[in-house]
Every structure is written in C-alpha cells, then in structure tokens.
Image (cartoon, helix red, strand yellow):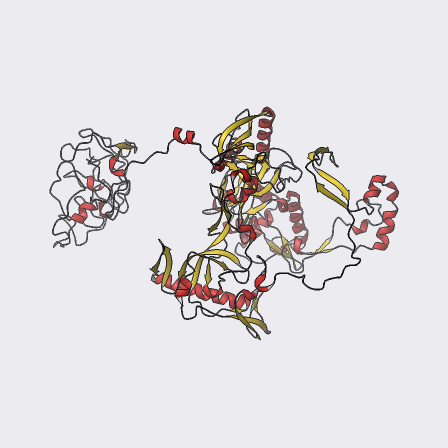
Amino acid sequence: MTDEKSPIIDFYPRDFELDMNGKKMEWEAVVKIPFIDETRLIPAMRSVEHRLTEREKERNSFGITLKFSYSPSVDELYPSSMPGIFPDIPHCRCVLNVFELPTLDGLDIIVGLCEGAGVGLESLAGFPSLKVLKHTASLEFHGVNVFQQDSRNESMVLRLENAYEGGKLEAAKKKLGKKVFVGYPFLQEAKVTAISDELFKYQLSDGQIMPIPHGPYEIEAWKKKAERMENAYSKRMGIVIGPVEVVVHTSILKGLKRTEDGAMVKEYAVIPGIETDYAAQAVVDEVVNEDTRFIEKEPLPITEEFPEGSRAFFLGEFNFGRPLEVFRHHPENKVDIWIYIMKGKEPDFGQQIALKAEQTTRYLPSYTVARQLGLNPLVLSKITSSFSVTVDDQRCNLGLNLKFEAKKLKVLGYSRRGDSGWEFSEKAIDLLREYMAKFPAFFKGVMRNPHGDIYTDTDFFDPSESKARVKEIIDWLKTIQTRSFEKVPLEAQQLEPEVVKEIEQAADAYLAANQEGDFKRIYNVPRRALLKPSDAEHMLQNQWFAIGDRVVYVQDSGKVPIATRGTVVGLTRTSRAMLLDVVFDATFMSGTTLSERCSPFRGMTVPTSSVLNLTNRQLIAFSKASAEKNPTPVPEPISALASNSNGRILPTEGLKPAQAPGQLMGSFSSAVQGGGNSRGGRGGRGNRSGNHTPDGVSGRGGHGGSPRGPTNMTMRGGPPVIMQRPQQHNQPQPNGSNGQPGFQHRGQQGGKDEQDGQPQAGRGTYNNVPPPAALNARGGGGGGGPRGRGRGGRGRGRGDRGDRGNAGNRSTMPVPVGEPQ
C-alpha cells in the first residue's frame, strides 16, 4: 500500500481528486479513486505471503468459535497480547472453551412470530402500537409533510376517537395526580400535574381541585399551543386527533429513586428537551405491559439486601466513598463493616488546577479581537467559521472553523459563546494573525466586500494565479489541522489537554506517595450510609458536578473498573442526562484518550449516575454523634434582629425605645414611601436616606425619595426585608459612602444629594405612623409637600444608593414583621 514499487500502488493514491457536486464541505464530496481489481490484488498478496510468520499466517486463516465464560473460582494473571499497548489483566476470571454452533437438523423453521409474542395491546414496553387508542383509517390525500414538503399522493390517515370533544372536563380531571402514558404512539410514562382548557387551569391542592383562571396572554398562548398540537399530529404523522379542547400537563418518568428505608419509588420530573403538554385525546390511561425496569419495590430486610460478605460504598461523613464489606448484622437495620481507608488525606488537586487554568486562560469578545487585528467584525465572523469560495464551480472552505453557530458548537481552547457573543482565546488570535500575515491579499479582498454572500477566487487574486493561490491557502489550512480541533457543544465545559495532563501528573504523584491503605472496623452503620453498586443508577442521578471534582466509579457494570477514582475534566448535557468526561487515576482496558486530551486508557465518558461525587458531597449520611456535634442552627425571628454598620445581624438587646413621632408632613403615602420634604409625589425633592431624613434636611431623591439600597421597607409598603443598622447619636460620620468624601449616591430615578449632613441628636424619625383620616384626600396644589404640583414633579438626576452614606438619624426600634411602617 505504501511501497512505490508495489504493483498495486495505484490502488492507494496519496493525492486524489474530489467531486464536490455542489457540496460545501470536503468530507461530503465523492472521492475519485480507482476501484479495487481483485484479479490484481490477490496475486500481489500471494507474492509476499512467504514473508509472514507462522503466527501471522494463523491470524489470516479461519479459526474455531471460542466461548469465554465467567468463573468465580478462577483468578489468574492474563498477559497482554500486545505489551506496551494493552495492559495485563491482573485478575482474569474467564474460562475458555471451544463452542460448536448448533445445527438445525430435525428442527422445523417457524415462519412468522413465535407463540406467545406480545403484539398490539399486549406489546411490551418500548414497542409502539396504534391499537392502544381507538381509531379508524382511510387512504386519502392529506398532504402529510415529509422532508419539509407536503406529499402529493395518497396517505394512510388515522382518525382518533375524541373522548373529550365538547370540553368534557370532568373525565379529564380524574387524571389529576395519576400516571398516564403520553407521546402516542411511542408511549412514555408520565404523571398528570394539571389539566387546562381555554379559560382555566386545574391543579390539585390538598386533595382539592383548584381552578386557576388564565390571563389574556395565557388564553392566547393556550389557543396557539392547542393548534400546534393538532397540526403536528395531522401534518407530521398523518393522525387526525380533532380539535384540542383539553390539554394534559405532565411530569415525565425520570426513573426510580431509593428512599432511606431502602424502598424504590418512581420519580417524575420535567426533563429538558422533552414535551410535557399533550392533547387529552392522545393520552393513554393504562397499558397491559408496563416497563419492568421501573416497578416500585418495598424495602427488603437488610439481611437480604446486604448479606454478610456483600460489598458496597460508605456514605458516612468520614471516609466518604470508600469501599466496604459487611461482616455482621444488628437489629434496627444496622450492620458492622470493614472499610478500606487510605493513610493520607486526599488533596483536592482537581479543582485547584482547574481554577488556575480558568484564571490564566484569557478570552476576548469578538469586537475587541476585530479592533486589535484591524478587521471588520463581519469579516472576523466569516473567517472564524466556514468561509466558502467558488473555484471552477466547486466550493472550497477557506475558513478556520473555530465556531459553528447553526450546529451550536465551539472549538475547545479557541472559542466560546459568552453573554455578549462569541469570544476567542489567545491561541485563536495568534492563528488569525498568522493567517493574515501569510495571505494579506486574501484578507484585503474580503474586507472590500464584507457583506458578500458568494465569493469566487478572482475576487481576491488575479485570474492568472487565483487557483494556485487558493490551493496555497488550502494546503496551509491542512498544515495547521483545523479539522482536528475538538468541537464540543456550546454549553459544554471541558479542560484543555495541557490542563488534563497536569491533573494526571498530580494524581500520579498522590498515588505514588499513598499506595498503602488499611482496613478499619465500623459498628452499627445504618442502611442509609451504604451505597449498593446496583442501586447507583437510581440514587446518584440527581447529583451535580463541576470541573475538577473528584469522583469514584460505583456501578457494578460498565467499562470502568468499580472503585476506580478520577477527576472530572468535562461536562456535556444531553436531552436526557449529564455526561462527564473523567480522567481516571489508573489505566484500564476500555479507557480512551478523550479525543487526544489525556493519556491512553485513562479517560472515559460516563453518566452522572455511575459515579459518586467526592468533592461536592451530596449524599452524606450523618451519624447521630456528628449531628449533635454540628447542630443545625435555628434562625432567629427577623423582628428580634438588627444590623450593625458592617451589615452583620445583631440582637436588639439594649436598644432604647423610640420616642413618639413628630408632626406628619405631607401625605401618609409620602411618609411611607420615604418622601420626606419632597417637592412632589413622584421623583420630587426627596431626601437621600428615604424616610430617615432629620427635620429641616431636604434632598433630591428618586422615585418618591425611596432609596435603592437596603431598607427596612419594601417598595409597596410590605413587610420589612432587613433591619436597618443602628447608629450612634451625636457621632459625626464622614461624607459619602464608607468614609469616601465626595461620593455621589445613586438612586433609582432621582437627583443628586443636596446634603451629606451629619446625624443630628435628639429627635428621631419613625416609620410606624398611623394613617391620618384624610389619607386619600387630594390637596389643592399637590400632596407631595409645600411645593407639590399635582402628582409631583419630575425627579432630577440620580438619587442615592440606599444608606451606604451613613447619613441621617435612624431609628433603632425593631419593627415586627407584618405591621405597617
């Protein structure tokens, strides 16, 4: 295949022609290489067969069928068949036997289904059937949409019987809180959380059906949703379900979860990417055969679930995630265990290295990159994605392929999608600089027409050399191997190969220094502190992870050896689950390189339900002793708390009762909203600190003078949110915020402060003021103050940021929750 003197070297050309045939990407093209001629190939192979060793000749011949069987009595070292590439198997428990295929002599061939096969209504879970709902079928012109185009010929159309025609809600309401099967004809178990029609949504509340009326927007949205449901069945599937008058809202079956007492119960949830609202007439109430994988089970006795000698993982506070073995049972569902522990504490090197990498890797927004490189932002966007140039009716991609907007992909280490758009790393910027330096004429041509859609080679180069210059660009792009860049989903978080290598080295150093472990006995361990490997899928599916977390593989199945520890180096979310890229501390047979990001046989992509998070421990089973040692703090009522000047909550002991308030100036609404001596109601001349302004001090506040910062009054006169900081009277405070002179406080829509005055002793201001009798009466010239104008003048400029200025005299009397202020 590679020898230039080979008689069949022409079968394997290094350079070959591509027929793009209107395609955009090279991998879509037809490869023009000669067909293999066996009359030349076989003689050429025979001419070199004498060079093969006997072992190689055996490998090229037909052998016998072998059967590998597991045997617990066998435990031997199986040497690697390819030393240096595949590791040895230290504990091989397989028995090798010759397997002879059975013959069909004397047997009758069954044509069709076997006896007892479940079809139709009796189909097993996962096998769709149209018969689970009553329907009729007819051949008619329906215009079913196939491949974005309506069919022109006749189609077989199904018409479902609509049991809810006319808005028969009573029958639908009986489904509330019960399990159903949705997604006809591809059924999926779900639980009904609500029923809705055009006007109301019905939910269960304490066993009672509560109607919740739709708002105007919700009514319109409900109608559109109902039309989409009917149209999707009709145009996409050729199923006429009729008008949708009742919608069933559901939570999809997520799986089983294990309770603390060992029972397995179903768990329903809203799963991203899976529809939750369905037309009532397309919902199936029950099926003959449910999925046996998700049948709820009562808890087993601990002697059966964890017999003596069984192995599991420890979920206690100390030695969390360590393997264990049960050796004795006790009453009250407790056991004694042997647990394997390491002598040294495991450092959290994963997150430390990941945090360091995040701080050192710098990404810049695309507009900043364009400004640095002197490019039009549109040109930068074109070059960093796929950029097609037509050469002799063939499309050539001259882009760097660093971002894929339509596919929602980014290139690891080069690009990412931020809140303000695409961002690029220093490596991407250096690559762009190199591209611009090598082919300046090409970039000048793109800059001349940044808004173009179709480009040809002559748009950038002279016609006499345009093809050769484009080929130079293509050859250079091949040298930098942009196609080998790792493309990951936009939401994926993954570490770069250099960082993963650093994590590997840290794990190797830790294992080299802590190879010896020890066994320890622990008594009276409750069931909730034991993780059975077969229950991992049900117990661990709700964990959350971060880059750098340490994990241990706890499932008794899969490609990773059980109890192997590793570090999370990537997270990717799918429609059903979160997948983790883990680089493990030791090599194993099925290990990968995680797309060349780690050493061979050390990486694997696993679901979150197969590993236990050791860094962010979410399943710790606290013992009674640890619970007594670290009791859960009981929060004090907010009415018994106040704040000091640093924002810390303090008890209100020793606080003196406030004196009676002075005469109310202006309206009661103005007082509650912090209007103070305002010029008007809305945004007038309020004070800087809301309703804490001393007499005779005025300011230009925001909306009604209410501060935007922390306050003990909600915007609409509701209960207090947090108590104000007590102030020492007759103690001068510096101007501004936190002692900064000249600091301008910012309000919501008000003007600047007129006074950063010092606190005045003596008379304080209070919120707990009874409303006057003429609360709702309107004044002749406006109720905002002496210079009120109707509903108040317009606020000027920007007001304060709450009480950061520490100005004004504040009350230290705590206000009980729920009382007017």
What is the total number of numbered labels drawn onto the structure image?
A: 0
Give the answer, above or below, for where 136 lies relative to 322: below
Quarter residue 430 falls in: top right
**Residue 816 point in image, percent of width and height:** 22, 40
Classify 81 as above or below 776.
above
User: Is 439 on the left or on the right of 653, as rendered?
Assistant: right
**With respect to residue 719, does 119 lie above or below?**
below
Front residue of 566 and 255: 255
Identify which residue is drawn at 17% across, 54% down.
Answer: 790
Percent x, y of residue 722: 28, 39
**Left or right: 780 in relation to 560:** left
Q: Nearer the viewer, residue 542 or 18?
A: 542
Viewer-proximal residue, 600 or 790? 600
Residue 172 percent location from the top left of the image: 42, 63
Q: Which residue corresponds to the image point at 34% horizontal and 63% vertical from the top-left?
A: 216
Q: Does residue 297 appear anywhere in the picture?
A: yes
Q: Residue furthest front?
A: 331
Q: Quadrant of the C terminus?
A: top left
Residue 428 in view in this figure: no
Residue at 49% x, 29% y: name it: 318
Q: Position of residue 631 (x, y in %)?
A: 37, 32
The part of the image, by quadrant, that contains residue 645 is top left
